[in-house]
Amino acid sequence: MRRISLTAVLALAACQPPPAVEVDAAPPPQTDRERASYGVGLNLGRSLRKNSLDLEPEWVLRGVQDGLNGRPEQLSQEQIAAALKAVRKPAPKPDVAPAHLERNCGRCHVTPRPEDLPRPWWLQVVEQMKALMEAQGPALTDVELREILSWYEGKAPRAFPTMPPEPAPSRLRFKPERLGALREVTAVTIADLGGGGPEVVVGSQDGQVVAVRAGGHSRLLGQAGVPVRFAVADLDGDKRPDLVVTDIGDLNPSTERRGRILVLHGQGDGRLGAPQVIARDLARPCDARAADMDGDGDLDLAVADFGWFGPGEILWLEQTTGAWRKHSVAKRTGVVDIHPFDLDGDGRADLLTLISQESEEIVAWHQGTRGFFQLRVYQADTPLYGSSSLERADLDGDGDLDLLYLNGDSQDSPPGAKPYHGVAWLENLDGGYGRHEVARLTEAFRGAAADLDGDGDLDLVVIRNFKSPDARAGLVWFEQTSDGVFSPYAVPESRGAMALAVGDLNGDGRPDIVTGGRAGATVWWNLGFAEDGTLQ
């Protein structure tokens, strides 16, 4: 019987009509050599078909024969590359989104819009999503991948529109002063540790945790991995403040479990004991805050374990006699902030979480008699939103706590400034929250609320974490000019930062600002307005 030739296989792969042969009558390969030969030809044919190349089968066969027999090349590699580029069939650019787009891209998060990114960025994003889907479940086929990428590239703008304008210089005066000698600062807080007034607690990427007073006097409190968040609470009930340290383990994206929660117990007179690890093997925790989660009269800790495209988690640590017991609330990746408090007035501590990494949502976890159940408070309309900070404050002065919400993670993939970065506040409406945009501000990273100008209402403080060193102002404050309406002002000489704290450090009644970043920690002394209200 007649056997199908390699010419026919390659012709099929190139979508050309093959010679008339009796394919059904061809016997299957019998020997290992025949099987290996068939496998190579089959894989070659599939590869050619997958890449949509318009080829001549006779010349494909001649190329195979020349390569197998060691004959001289008839073309240079540059000529071959140019020819392959010329014969590649362009993928169609449909006006309508592929039918499988929502099924594939929308199964984990909101489906992104083409205008969310410029055209050159979509290849990276789509390939990244394909890799994640392969790791977590059914993956995109190559045909689906090409169709999705073609649609996004065909609809996306060539570049982002004009970025939001930079804020005007601040009329409120601030005087910067370097705090301590640490560089690569990753965490700051203002706290009275029992030693006679507020101090600034500073953590650096090399693990040092120090307490610094105005004037530069500092003391080492301990080593704590890579501290990214501090909380102060009397965990052991001895009426001495303790320091809770969230050690992320690794600032860079990683699935390794190096994160820890540590406690430095107060010893009196501002002294703290050696760091004690109460939880380890966490997946890059970002936040830990104290609350009585189980109603037994002592303080527990709610923890946001970020993860990275993998083992993230919302959990709480129960304080028991001589130990801390872990309780999982939900497996969620990308948890940035966690706030434990009674959301619904039933006497039980609930959790309010900010979840980034494509979810881009604020989720409430209500504690019932049989565990926690979730309710979404808000979700952004794009998975590229870059959620970065969530804090609670009574922004409209009505007696309940609203939410200050920032989105401006410059390291969010793909990294960089995006025109939809900014600041918003969510008004507490007794049963829900209403979102109000404050301003568009690229790379808005952390926020806080305080009455900076002394007029009786809360203003906003925002730091920006730039992807690389930048001359733009890294510290911006927003004056509340009327209920819920804010005007932004840039603080001169400020640079990008990743840590923020606000409090009155010198007792003059004006909140000061502390920032931390690559160059170290800086206190921005609040000097108030000049007598004529102008910038000096």
Image (cartoon, grey):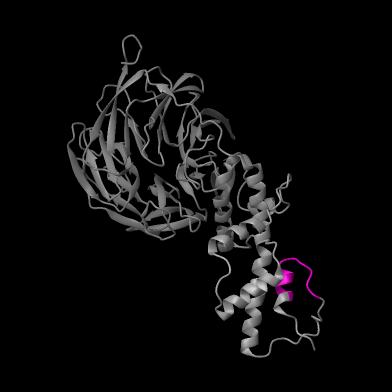
Residue farthest to the bottom, as pictured:
31
Q: Residue at x 72, y 86 (%)?
A: 28
The image quadrant that residue 411 belongs to is: top left
**Could you tell whether 96 is left or right of 264 in the image?**
right
Question: Is residue 383 visible to us here?
Answer: no
Q: What is the quadrant of the N terminus in the image?
A: bottom right
- Looking at this view, is 129 or 156 the one in front? 156
Q: Residue at x 40, y 17 (%)?
A: 455
Residue farthest to the top, as pictured:
532
Asked if 397 appears above or below 137 in the picture, the reply is above
- Looking at this view, is 77 or 439 the one in front? 77
- Looking at this view, is 13 or 474 the one in front? 13
- Looking at this view, is 276 or 176 the one in front? 176
Asked if 262 appears above or below 428 in the picture, the reply is below
Question: Is residue 307 visible to us here?
Answer: yes
**Could you tell whether 488 is left or right of 519 in the image?**
right
Q: Position of residue 376 (x, y in %)?
A: 59, 43
Q: What is the quadrant of the C terminus in the image?
A: top left
Q: Position of residue 77 (x, y in %)?
A: 54, 64
Please say whether residue 131 is one of the residues in the magenta stretch: no
The image quadrant that residue 60 belongs to is: bottom right
Asked if 161 appears above or below 209 in the picture, the reply is above
**Could you tell whether 206 is left or right of 344 in the image?**
left
Q: Position of residue 168 (x, y in %)?
A: 42, 21
Asked if 333 appears above or below 39 in the picture, the reply is above
Q: Position of residue 428 (x, y in %)?
A: 54, 31
Identify the magenta region.
8-19
Total marks placed: 0
